[in-house]
Image: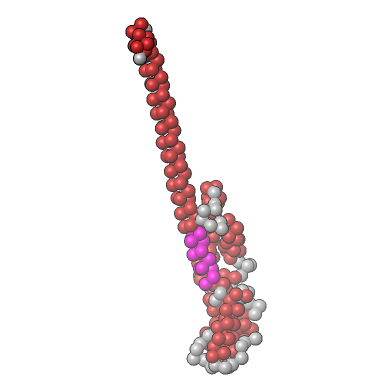
Amino acid sequence: MEALLEFAGDYWWLVFPLSGVFAAWGSSWSKANERRHQRKVELHKLRHQGQQLEQTQTGEVKALMEAHDAVNYRWLDYELDVGKLIDFPTMTDVREPLTVAFLRAKREADALRPATPESRSAARCTEYRAAVNNYDVAFSVAESEARRIKAGNFSVKERQRLATARTLITIAVDNAASPAERQTAYRRALREVEGLIALPDGAVNLLKEQVARALESGRGQAPA
């Protein structure tokens, strides 16, 4: 202890240069620590912004998928309803440019549809948004035209056949009709539209199931 005090007494003048060294070192350490803290803050902000962007994009893709589904449901209203297709035959007529346009737009939207809202990049999200919008517009235009012209592209005799088929479809699904009447109406309706409009398999199968359920409840035979 005495030796330490003697050293301090003999070399007291070192306090001044050493204090400068310690002050400089302390200042340097403080700045380095501040820079580390700033980098952590900036990194946290970047991560937070990335999460917000990802959540926003996921929400947008989810909304686009719901809009896509909404147009599909509108399309299925025709695709699965024989009566509706008889009323608006151009909705399945691939000779109609507007019908072809919305079917092509549907195919493009379906191809770009992601498996989940999270599995789509920003660039692909932009493509998907455009495809869904095009599909919606193309379908709306085709539907408006189909409702405007109805069966106007057919001859008088062809329109009479379609009208007869529409009446028969109503009988085929009428609970008040007998099983025999239903079965006869079902078969005649399909013959009337043959060669006039293309009925999707889904629509025919659904109609067949509706008639079959009624026939089974009345102990009739299922339609062929």
Give the residues in magenta. 64-77
Specify whether 40 is left or right of 134: left
* Residue 179 versus residue 132 in the image, above or below: below
> Residue at 43% of width from left, 26% of height from top?
32
- Residue 95 visible? The answer is yes
Q: Position of residue 144 (x, y in %)?
A: 50, 67
Q: Choose top left, top right, bottom left or bottom right for residue 224.
A: bottom right
Specify whether 177 is left or right of 22: right
Direction front: furthest residue = 2
Locate the N terminus by quadrant: top left
Q: Nearer the viewer, residue 86 or 186?
A: 186
- Say whether residue 66 is magenta: yes
* Residue 111 versus residue 35 in the image, above or below: below
Q: Position of residue 149 (x, y in %)?
A: 53, 71
Q: Nearer the viewer, residue 29 or 36?
A: 29
Q: Choose top left, top right, bottom left or bottom right for residue 183.
A: bottom right
Specify whether 11 is left or right of 210: left
> Residue at 43% of width from left, 31% of height from top?
36
- Residue 167 visible? The answer is no
Q: Position of residue 179 (x, y in %)?
A: 56, 92
Q: Position of residue 136 (x, y in %)?
A: 51, 61
Q: Nearer the viewer, residue 19 or 78?
A: 19
